[in-house]
Amino acid sequence: MSINRNKKEEIVRELHEKIARTDAILLTDHTGLKVKDITLLRRKLRDASVEYRILKNTLARLAIRDTGKEELETYLDGPTSMMFLDRDVVRGTKTLIDFIKVFEKPEIKIGFIDDRLYDKTQLLTISKLPPREALIASFAGGLVSPLNRVAFLMAELIGRFVRAVDAVRAGKESSTASR
């Protein structure tokens, strides 16, 4: 099915905007996946806030130009799908890796995260990281822990001071009562 030039230009423009603003993109080779499998993968990825697009390489090459992600052009050969991971890179990558474990497809070509290329092995490592929320909670806990310790130490210091003042007061009361 051929699409007209205006439609192609619109696709390239839309893709260009998406590629330029997305911090994480994964390219895969979807060869051998059935339509129902691709539909299932799309649904799982959508639940992880990931968009999955099957591309024509010529249109993708045009869309990638002037985005700062031109390194991806090298991997645009053969059947290519592009994943846009806007929110949680770990969750999206894990969803893809879990799908691959079951279906043995698609084949990961490359990942481009925060202006750096990641191969399949590195993406597998990323997928093993804790979810974003857990990382944030751990970081926040690390920040709060020293503050809690300082608060505890301050409370203990004030408590000691109060007990010392109380002991001095009690000592003065007992000395005046014994006279």
Image (tube, rainbow, N blue to C red):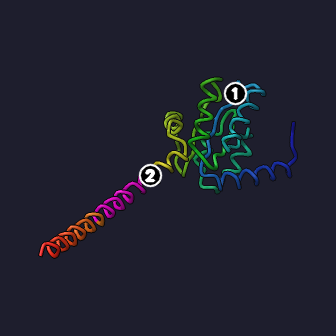
Over which residues does the magenta segment extend? 141-157
Q: Which badge, 2 or 1, is on the more N-terminal residue?
A: 1
Residue 147 forms part of the magenta stretch: yes
Q: Identity of the amino acid at label 2?
A: Gly
The disc at residue 82 is none
In this rendering, position of residue 53 left or right of residue 114: right
Mark 2 to mark 1: distance in Å?
A: 44 Å
Question: In the rendered picture of this protein, how many numbered marks are placed on residues?
Answer: 2
Q: Look at the picture and state if 176 lies above or below 135.
A: below
- Indicate left or right for 116 with 174 as reference: right
Q: For the residue labelled by badge 2, is the local secondary structure a helix, a strand or a loop?
A: helix
Residue 147 screen position, x and y as percent: 38, 60
Give the residue type at disc 1.
Thr
- Structural crowding at the residue carrying mark 1, measured as other residues with C-alpha within 10 Å and reported as few (<14), some (14–19) or many (≥20): few
Expressed as whole percent of the image width and height from the top left, the position of residue 67 reads: 63, 55
Residue in the image at 64% along x and 49% along y: 86
Q: Secondary structure at mark 1?
A: loop
Q: In x, y percent, where is residue 96?
A: 62, 34
Q: Which mark is residue 31?
A: 1
Looking at this view, is 175 or 97 the one in front? 175
Q: Is residue 8 part of the magenta span, yes or no?
A: no
Left or right: 169, with 84 as reference point: left
Q: Is 56 located above or below residue 6 in the figure?
A: above
